[in-house]
Image (spheres, helix red, strand yellow):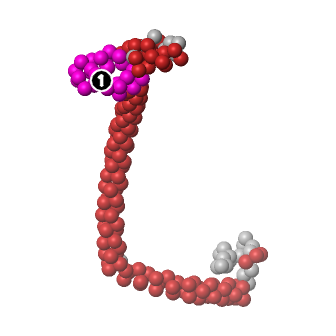
């Protein structure tokens, strides 16, 4: 029985029957560690602070700390992988941004060229366009006059030559095709 070895805890040994194999192993290694510390430091030999129970608690605490450190190392490794993936993603975004900036520069140049062309067009072609607009505005009036003249001409044909557009004969001297402008 492990507790029977220490005189300070001899009364507890009556209450406890035995330790589990894991605790027994931890207690024996703790006892060895305690004995080693006592050999190295004479003041610890008389101290009750390094009793087996304290050593087991220290062993549990150190194992807990080791578990936390291992967990943190795993988390750190995952974070490093995520950082690498993020850096790769950032590089891809930088490439796309570079392509978009190049396209923006090209489009800006094209806009400047088109604005310059528009200025040249207004300066060189603008007068001809105004003349064309004036001419096309007068075409409507000219066409209206032509329609009236055509209608008058058909009346003259009907009165003078006995022309009837709907009842044209094969042997008529006048063989024009009737047309009425819209």
Asked if residue 101 is positioned above or below residue 55 in the image, the reply reads: below
Give the left or right position of residue 116, taking residue 141 as reference.
left
Q: Residue at x 39, y 16 (%)?
A: 6
**Front position in the image: 72 or 59:** 59
Q: In the picture provided, is 14 more to the left or to the right than 90? A: right
Whether residue 176 is situated above or below residue 105 in the rendered picture = below
Q: Give 161 or 64, whichever is nearer the viewer.
A: 64
Magenta-colored stretch includes residue 97: no
User: Does residue 117 show up?
Assistant: no
The image shows residue 182 at horizontal and vertical percentages of: 65, 79
Query: Within the image, what quadrant is residue 129 found in?
Result: bottom left
Q: Where is residue 145, by image quadrant?
A: bottom right
Let me know if residue 103 appears in the view: yes
Q: Residue at x 44, y 19 (%)?
A: 9
> Which residue corresponds to the image point at 66% horizontal and 89% vertical from the top-left?
152
Secondary-structure class at tag 1? loop
For this rendering, which residue is in front, 149 or 57?
57
Residue 48 occupies quadrant: top left
Examine the rendered structure and indicate whether residue 113 appears above or below residue 20: below
The answer to if 49 sits in the magenta stretch is yes
Residue holding disc 1: 46
Task: Name the spot of residue 92 as percent of width and height, x first.
Answer: 35, 44
Residue 168, x across and y down, in percent: 74, 74
Look at the image and give the residue range highlighted in magenta: 30-55
Q: Magenta region, mostly helix, strand or loop? A: helix
What residue is drawn where x is 33% and y is 42%?
Answer: 87
User: Measured from the top left, where is residue 14 in percent x and y?
Assistant: 51, 14
Q: How many marks?
A: 1
Please rate how many residues cluster around mark 1, counting C-alpha atoms within 10 Å: few if below 14, some from 14 to 19, many from 20.
Answer: few
């Amino acid at each position: 029985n492990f507790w029977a070895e220490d005189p300070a805890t001899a009364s507890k040994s009556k209450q406890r029957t035995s330790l589990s194999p894991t605790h027994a192993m931890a207690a024996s290694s703790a006892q060895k560690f305690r004995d080693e510390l006592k050999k190295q430091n004479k003041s610890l030999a008389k101290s009750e602070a390094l009793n087996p129970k304290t050593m087991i608690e220290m062993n549990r605490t150190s194992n807990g700390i080791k578990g936390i450190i291992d967990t943190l190392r795993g988390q750190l490794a995952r974070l490093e992988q995520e950082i690498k993936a993020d850096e790769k993603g950032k590089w891809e975004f930088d490439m796309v941004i570079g392509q978009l900036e190049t396209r923006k520069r090209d489009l800006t140049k094209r806009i400047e060229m088109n604005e310059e062309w528009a200025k040249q067009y207004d300066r060189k072609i603008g007068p001809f366009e105004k003349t064309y607009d004036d001419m096309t505005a007068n075409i409507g009036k000219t066409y209206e006059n032509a329609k009236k003249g055509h209608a008058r001409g058909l009346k003259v044909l009907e009165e003078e030559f006995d022309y009837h557009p709907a009842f044209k004969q094969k042997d008529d001297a006048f063989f024009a095709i009737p047309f009425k402008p819209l």
